[in-house]
Image (cartoon, rainbow, N blue to C red):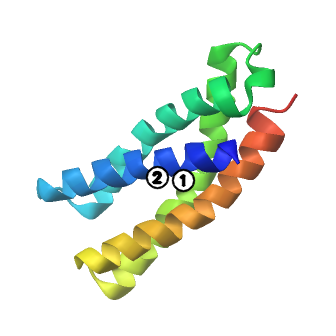
Amino acid sequence: MRFGVVGAIGFVVDGGLLWFLISLDISPYIARALSFPVAVVVTWALNRNWTFVATSHAHPKGQFQCYFAVQVVGALSNYGVYSLIILGFGVASATVFWAFVAGSALGAVLNFCGARYVAFRA
């Protein structure tokens, strides 16, 4: 449940920054590449200190590096789905939104598995 709440917060951070950057006429591809790392830092801090608190004794730098590597796997699949949808259907606002949602859904599943079984394993 906590991972879902943190994921929702990350989704809002990522999506909010994405829309803000797009509103500045930044390409949706570049905007997505910029919004993602911010969301990773936010979700790592929340997951470390709330979701997987039993593993908070691990060294923060090493744990963040592992978490970031896991997130990159999720991000590549997330960004791949996002990009393919935009490439196939265009850059209309609704398309970008649904591409973001679809990519995020796949990324969430991969990120949970990676966080639970790799980055924050007991």
Expressed as whole percent of the image width and height from the top left, the position of residue 17 reads: 29, 47
Q: Is residue 98 above or below residue 47?
A: below
Identified at 47% across, 61% down, the residue is: 79
Identified at 67% across, 42% down, the residue is: 2
Q: Is residue 1 left or right of residue 55?
A: left
Q: Is residue 96 left or right of residue 44?
A: left
- Residue furthest toward the bottom? 89
Q: What residue type is disc 1 on?
A: Ala
Identified at 62% across, 57% down, the residue is: 108
Expressed as whole percent of the image width and height from the top left, the position of residue 87 reads: 35, 79
Expressed as whole percent of the image width and height from the top left, the position of residue 58 reads: 76, 16
Q: Quadrant of residue 60?
A: top right
Q: What residue type is disc 2 on?
A: Phe
Q: Secondary structure at mark 2?
A: helix
Which residue is disc 1 drawn over?
75
Q: Which mark is residue 14?
A: none
* 75 vs 97, nearest the viewer: 97
Expressed as whole percent of the image width and height from the top left, the position of residue 50 reads: 66, 28
Q: Residues within 10 Å of mark 1 (few under 14, many from 20)?
A: many
Between marks 2 and 1, how big is the CA–CA gap?
12 Å
Q: Quadrant of residue 59?
A: top right
Q: In the rendered structure, are the residues bearing label 2 and label 1 in contact, judged by CB atoms less than 8 Å apart?
A: no
Q: Which mark is residue 11?
A: 2
Quadrant of the frame with the C terminus: top right
Q: Is residue 5 left or right of residue 115?
A: left
Q: Is residue 60 left or right of residue 83?
A: right
Q: Secondary structure at mark 1?
A: helix
Q: Residues within 10 Å of mark 2 (few under 14, many from 20)?
A: many
Q: Is residue 84 above or below residue 46?
A: below
